[in-house]
Image: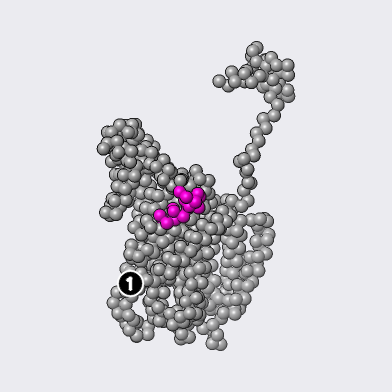
Amino acid sequence: MEAIFLAYIAPIMFGTLVFLLLLGFPVAFALAANGILYGLIGIEMGLLSPALFQALPQRVFGVMSNESLLAVPFFTFMGLILERSGMAEDLLETIGQLFGPLRGGLAIAVILVGAMLAATTGVVSASVISMGLISLPIMLRYGYDRRLASGVIAASGTLSQIIPPSLVLIVLADQLGRSIGDMYKGAFLPGFALTGLYILYVVAVSFLKPKAAPAIPPEARTFVEPNGGHGIPSLLVLMALSVAVAVAGVEVLLPDNVHVDELIVTSILVWGVTAFVLALVNKVLRLGLLSKIAERVTFVLIPPLALIFLVLGTIFIGVATPTEGGAMGAVGALIMALIKRRLNWSLLRQAMDTTTTLTCFVVFILIGSSVFSLTFRGVNGDLWVEHLLIGLPGGEMGFLIVVSILTFALAFFLDFFELAFIIVPLLGPVAEKMGIDLIWFGVLLAVNMQTSFMHPPFGFALFYLRSVAPKEDYIDKVTGQPIAKVTTGQIYWGSIPFIVIQLFMVAMVLLYPSMVTHYKADRPKVDIENIEIDVGTFSGYGTGSYGDGSAAGAYGPDVGSDAGGTPSDQELNNMFK
């Protein structure tokens, strides 16, 4: 019995961890306790050395001294300051007025604001709760289908898991031992492609079922010009001028063959700065050339966009590390809140409390994961996982498909932090041994982990929306009309189409790796099959232009006796022993 236990201690250890997590134990303590328990059992049974736990202090210190993890509190603080200073309300009101006259316009506005909040907060709860409180009552007021409205809000909130600067990408990069900047570059295109797919779905629904996503009525449009128009032509002219300047600026600022992500970031940054300057000149000089909606869109949309793309741009082009970019973003968020006169001690304290809580949460899980992995590797658990997965049929593609299915299944019960700290350290070494690009692998997992927030019945985004959605029928304060409640079933059914879209995005990343691997497009390609090492002609140190001694003088009387002054192979072997 003891021999069987020792032979299968690794799978038993992993099974115990899953059992403890399903019972509801905190992840950090389940990981650490499991590692210590089986470490003690292994020592008692003679499988492990008592010196094993002497490595624990070094592992904990390694976690605490990891400078890359400083990006977590910086980006979290930046997002919370922007979100709690009223940015979400301003964006939803402005973009809602801009797209509201279109069928499905409010849902498109929610998706676009969700993408912007994703690029600032990096926290699903903040995005979902903010948009649920602000946009859900408006969508219900104008007759949106409840399943579509709830699905759009929940799915848009999960974009913060894949759009940089995502906390998930920071953790995945740390666990896989890769650069955070490279992970951001790799996730850039899949994140915005997923946003585009959400918008395409809403457009399709609004055409196939017009009553499910109606346009807002004319009387609800607040930005009206004296002549009765809505000022859209003025906005289009401003955007066209800004785009022209951005195209010309990119030609001057960037070299040829630049990365796609750097091109996009720099273009949007130049476009935003140009539009803001033009609108500011128009307002200061009172030229009256721009409409109300044009000025509103520029002054509300451009500052957070500029901050986001300034931070990402400095990271992408290598001017700043992700940690330095996060610190710059945090300072920029404070400045923006101060300019809007919304920065006060209460807001600052709330943001710091939440940032501290989330950072401690991440660090404690990472410490628990370090304890667990120390023992798991000690009992050769990494070899067990490797033998289990490396022999799968289909080779590399078979491994990736099985990992994707496994991640999707575990996402029903575990959130993204638990998945990142438990399965990634086990799967990463196997993927590396199979020659899989770990940035591609990490982005593939990140897109898949998004579904952990959308899965009925345990999806956290669904719980967050349930907490702010109306549980009882109520009377709308604006129209005075009765509004029916949103049921839990409607929230669950509304999430399913977006889960399908997320899985489609997983398949796209799996089938088209270039969506991610463009991050290394400008790096020199090395053919490891044809490497030549040229060491030149060996004539002994102290000879030639660096000295006038002979080889014998350089190495001693017994070396360098060949005719050409070159030591023989045997003499070289003796020298370097």
Screen quadrant of the N terminus: top left
At x 51%, y 72%, the residue is: 200
Q: Position of residue 140 (x, y in %)?
A: 38, 79
Given residues 470 and 480, the one toward you in this image is: 470
Disc 1 crowd, CA 10 A, few/some/many (<14, 14-19, 20+): few
Q: Is residue 400 magenta?
A: yes
Q: Nearer the viewer, residue 565 or 310?
A: 565
Q: Is residue 226 above or below residue 465?
A: below
Q: Can residue 310 be seen?
A: no
Report the residue marked by disc 1.
489
**Magenta region includes residue 239:** no
Residue 501's place in the image compared with 552, above or below, is: below
Residue 575 at x, y = what percent?
A: 59, 19
Residue 53 visible to the viewer: yes
Task: Give the position of the C terminus as an image quadrant.
Answer: top right
- Which portion, as a residue range, is magenta? 392-407
Q: Residue 174 location, x and y as percent?
A: 45, 47
Q: Type of residue at label 1?
A: Gly
